[in-house]
Image: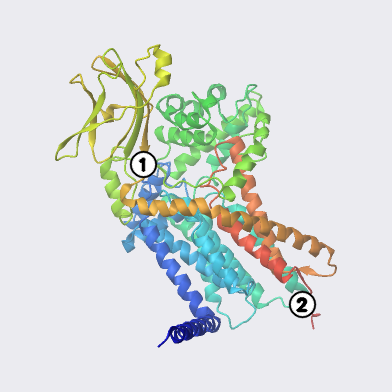
Amino acid sequence: MNAYEKILKNTRALNGLKNNFKKSFCNFQNLIANNKRWVTSVLFISVALFYLFFMAHLPISLYTTSNHDDALFIKNAMSIAHGEWLGAYNNLTLAKGVAFPFFLSLSSFTGLPITFMLGLLNLAAIYLLIFELRRLISNKTLLLFLALILIFHPALMPTRITRDFIYPAFALFLIAGLIRASHHDSEKDSLLSICAYGFLGGWFFLIREEGIWITPLLIAIIVYRYLILRPSGKIYHPTIKSGCIFILCLLIPTAIVSSVNYVQYGRFVTQEFTNGHFIKVLGQLNSVVDKQDTPYIPVSEKKRALIYKVSPSFRELKPFLEGDLKVWQESGCAIYPHTCGDYAGGWFMWAFRDAVARKGYYQSTKTAEDFYRQLGNEITKACREGLLSCQSNLLPVIPSIPKENFSLIIPKLNQAIKNLLVINPTDLTAGPSLEPRFLLEQYRDFLGYPRITPTESESDFQIKGWFYGPTAANQGAWLELICTDGYRNLRLAIAREQSPDLIKFFKDSRASMQRFTVQISGDLKCSFASTDSRSLLPQNLISNKGGAYPLGLNTLFIDQKIPSPTIRDHHNTLSIKERITSNYRWVVIPLIIIGLISFFIATIICLFIKKKWPSFLYVLSLALWGVIALRMLILMIIELSSFPGITILYMLPIYPMIIIVSCLSMWLLFTRDFCITPAFKKPQ
């Protein structure tokens, strides 16, 4: 075989491979085209399995001493799991909604990690929403894209055990049920599924106290469907019937929880922060006016002094509010330095409830309500007689907003937008878990042994500082670490770093290499030692704020001691989350911008079309944009009056909403489904 024949043979072989590849590719394309549903299902299931595996390995922070937040939810959940409802009555029993403790108790029966169960809840909510959105969006690719973008939203990945991480899922249940009930056009369709959606959505209002912000969405859709169907004369239309059933089933969880609370504690309420005399008295305390009001201090020390004089009931709380309960002042002080020495907005109400409990008025709901009623009457009388200067607020429970705080609206709005667009990155973890160790193990056991961040005693630490003194100058005596891992002793060298600032400060040219940076593993117990002395400084005695410590004849100065929340055993999981967080914005930013522009264009076009009604898709989009704006308004009011409200945690329920409504708005413009002409029929 000559060279020409070899080339010809190889060419024919390459052409054959090329034709085979083309044929295989065409077959693959045909397979996808003919089995779109099957391929989409396999892809979704594969992504879901990866997501659940990822969530099961995601570390969270356990706050065992957060008795008014994380620890409270876990304690209430343990009481429910043991058949004791919320336990014995006290000032915290009905302070918060029962939905999250109930979810934790159900999760404990499975024995699976709570992070896995939270992931499963999110998947269920997203799947049901996508399933119902098929009635509005016929493009499966867009639905699949929406599902994927919702599943991997970094803000929805839990960092601690708090109720806000189930808030988005139940919001999605509510939206899915609303779509289902609004499209129940056939008597043959099952009403059981609509009732199930209503029951699931009803728990949304038992998660946080301000759940009313989503009611405009419900009202808008219900009123729209009624107005569309009313002229047809079909009062008993299936859609109207299904809407009524959906609303009734929404109320079932509230009715059940209120009934159980009545049997257990004597009050037909879901929680006490939106019902009863406590909230009224809190509003009355906020209404007291002082000539020198300080921002973020609703009931200042001066106001309390005035109220003590005119209210015997409030005077009973003075030993506590002016005593050891001042520990509540530290939280506000850390955020608003000018409030140090007094109670900042969002923390006073908790100190107030604790003081009432310390005085012994939380023996039962009746004694607590009687005390608050009496206190309220005393303040009302003092205001009426002019003994106190009082000014009612539009929102009584919210302290008045000082004029100077209105200048914060623009920067806080900018912060909110950056949060929504994921420009401000979400936290990988919520920091170290909190000891004591026995509570950590008890809570982990109840929560299915999720992976947790280490405590400060277990965390890696980075320590920066300098070492200088009579024998340390001119690269003389230096530092070393003497460590033990429980089995052996180790001597670890510490590298010198340049220190031009010390030369200038001490006016000593020999202090040129006296700085250091050292990373200490949480697995080791280490002490600093000087090479010319037997003196030791254990690392656990060094304050996180740093400071100066004598070591031999020299001084060891610590600039900062930074605990690292990153867990070496879960480095891969946190690395994946970090990559998702850093790249997610490049999807969300254009999506939300295009969604807003699409809705604006659709609105302009719809306004110029006469004698037509807006379509259901348009009304749903409008309502979703509206409740997002309302939620932001509520958080802005809280931010300007009480405590930080423009945070990722409080914005969690609107993260999936803004992605959903952006996709709906794009589809609205693409299909030009702005308006409809109802086929009204005159009643016979």
Residue at left 32%, top 44%? 454
Residue at left 46%, top 82%? 7
Q: Under tag 1, what secondary structure?
A: loop
181 with respect to 669 (left or right): left
Disc 1: which residue: 432
Q: How far apart are marks 2 and 1 (CA)?
A: 62 Å
Disc 2: which residue: 232
300 with respect to 549 (left or right): right
Counting from the top left corner in percent of width and height, residue 318 is at 46, 25
Count neighbours of disc 2 (C-alpha within 10 A) and say few if under 14, some if 14 to 19, many if 20 or more.
some
Q: How many marks?
A: 2
The answer to whether residue 216 is visible is: no
Which numbered disc flags the more N-terminal residue, 2 or 1?
2
Marks 2 and 1 in Cβ contact (< 8 Å):
no
Counting from the top left corner in percent of width and height, residue 593 is at 66, 55
Q: Quadrant of the C terminus?
A: bottom right
Counting from the top left corner in percent of width and height, residue 333 is at 49, 28
Residue at left 67%, top 29%? 404
